[in-house]
Image (spheres, coloured by chain):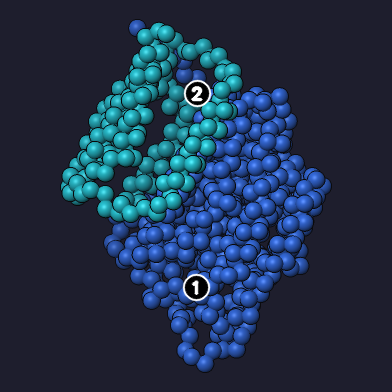
Chain colours: A cyan, B blue
Amino acid sequence: MGPATIVFWLASAVALAGGLGVVLFKEPIRNVLSLVLVMLSLAVLFLLLSAQFVFAVQVIVYAGAVMVLFLFVITLLGPVREQGTVRLPWQIFISAVVIAAFAGFLVAMLRGVSYRTPDAADPIFGSVQSIGVGLFTDYLFPFELTSILLLVAAVGC
Amino acid sequence: MIAAAQVTYTAAQAWSDLAQIGPIVAVTVALLVAVVVDLLLPRGLRGPVVTVIAIVGLVSALAIAAYRLVNGYGGPAYFRFVSGDAFALFFEMLFALIGVLAVIVSSSYVRRRGLYEAELQVLTLAAIVGMMSLAAAGSLVTVFLGLELLSIALYVSCGYNRIELPSQESAAKYLIIGGFASAFVLYGMALIYGATGTTVLSDIATRVTSDSAGNPLLLLGVLLMGVGFAFKVSAAPFHMWTPDVYQGAPLPVTAFMSVATKAAAFAMILRVFNYGLGHLGPEWQVLLAFTAAASMVVGNLMAIVQASLKRMLAYSGVAHAGYILVGVLAGGRAGVAAVLFYLFGYVFMNFGAFAVVSTLSGPAGDGDLYEDLNGLAYRNPTLGVLMSVFMLSLAGFPPMVGFFGKVFLFTAGISAGWTWLVVLAVLTSVVSVYYYFRVLFHVWSPLPEAPVRFAFGPVRGPVTVVLLAGVFAVALGPLSGFLLQVGLNGAAPLLSGR
């Protein structure tokens, strides 16, 4: 087991723990901080895939800027604990059964997968340069569509 | 120092790519102009001017699409991420048409309800850009972005009537369920990408052969995408959100999304399943056959017991999703053409029905109970007759377009061997006659003694739209041979390369 494998498992475990924290904590501040944890461990996973630029963007934009905005909004609104804690008793049971069934199904399906060998990577893969070229050639249409998507989100606010 | 990357994208190619997506460009330009104009003009002018800009943009998109369809349509553009083929052009024309109708109806509606006009038109344009991209998609990336663009625009539109609780409820439910469905779709796409190493649909079509059926990654991907798609077309058992969202949203938004989202989602299913994953047919057909059967039964039975017209039309939409899935399952040239034909007809009859209901709204709210239709045929004979036409068409009576649509779908289904599903579809169609005729009963009942809840204000816009939709719905019946030809033409790009 090489160091990369160990880092992968660690980062994945932290990401999962963060994800659970987002769902389970009752105070909004803790939810946001858990989300920061998820973002940071995802950044580590990106770095493992030699996507340095995405790693940096993930840390600066998501873990940094976006999460700070979240924190601002929550502190401005007052960090109140979650209000409606009343749940139907059978809901937890049903969701547990469904989650267990789906997880079991996933494990059963994915046990015998023979994964493809990855395609050989470009020498400039993961650099700012390769992302820039990709955005304005191969991925031009999705890139422009994304900008309209963001514009619409801004109009809708 | 890293070696310089080679960029080989030339200006000539850029122009030809831009021409391929001409209709999308036209709507996008209208959207951008509308956003800026909305900021510059004085308050009183904004609404009408933006509405005019939206109509101009949509009509030019329609003209460009028609021109390209007649004068030799294109193929893949932008590195196969999008396509200007006949299939895309068919849907682009359809969405431009619905867009024009929706913009006219909402313009009159927001004035009567005292809401802002400009933003709603901008959101409608944005949703149409998303739908057109979805229909033209050549890659899973484009599919997902188009899906999100149309969904986000519609989440906002649903909650457009901010001061009303049902509108907020509608937006919140649609946002949560829609986000959930998108997550399913995205997970499925990721697995498909993992299994094939590409997101481009034509590459997926060549790499996924019938031997790939044993690959669990592909199967899981198909399952997850199928669940997400079923949410989007509101097919049972993933239809629970539909009645609540349709009921709470402002009426023109409901009318628009009930037909346009359905058409866009079916375009997506045809592109991804029938084209990209065509060789996995036996796998996804099992999933969709169950969904189709459930939709027909649940949709038709639940529609009977509704008191609200919006909810009834929502459940009727679930049932129609079931019928259309028969054509998707049948596949092949006949099946895909039948789906395109049915969507074209369904758009006009369902939109027309909603537009009639939207004329009944006033400052006090929407009139969406059966009782609000009482004596409509005497209060406003045009609307009464047209509402009857729409209901007969939805029920599938000859010589309406709904009848021909069902005939094409069901014959395609039988010749592809889905006899049990077609038998179920015919039986449930018979059930549907009951609730469509209940509307007719109220429309043609004598004028009520008590004063009606909603008198007619100045509703010229919607009446025009209802007339247009009615003319289409009536005229498409006799013209169905021609339209089927257009549909067959549109189906061809999905079948080449097999």
Note whether B227 is above or below B113 in the view shown. Answer: above
Q: Earlier in the sequence, mark 2 or mark 1?
A: 2
Residue at the extreme bottom of the image, as rendered: B449
Q: Is residue B496 visible?
A: yes
Q: Amino acid at mark 1?
A: Asp
Give the labeled residue for mark 2.
B9
Note whether B477 is above or below A141 in the view shown. Answer: below
Horizontal placement of B80 versus A58: left or right?
A: right
Picture coordinates of residue A150 (x, y %)? 37, 42
Note whether A27 is above or below B294 in the view shown. Answer: above
Task: Identify the mark at residue A151; answer none if there is no mark.
Answer: none
Q: Which residue is nearer to you in this view: B304 or B361?
A: B304
Q: Residue at x 58, y 77 (%)?
A: B383
Q: Chain of mark 2?
A: B
Picture coordinates of residue B171 (x, y %)? 40, 56
Q: Residue at x 59, y 18 (%)?
A: A114
Q: Secondary structure at mark 2?
A: loop
Quadrant where the N terminus of chain A lies?
Answer: top left
Residue B220 placement: quadrant = top right
Task: Identify the mark at residue B368; answer none if there is no mark.
Answer: 1
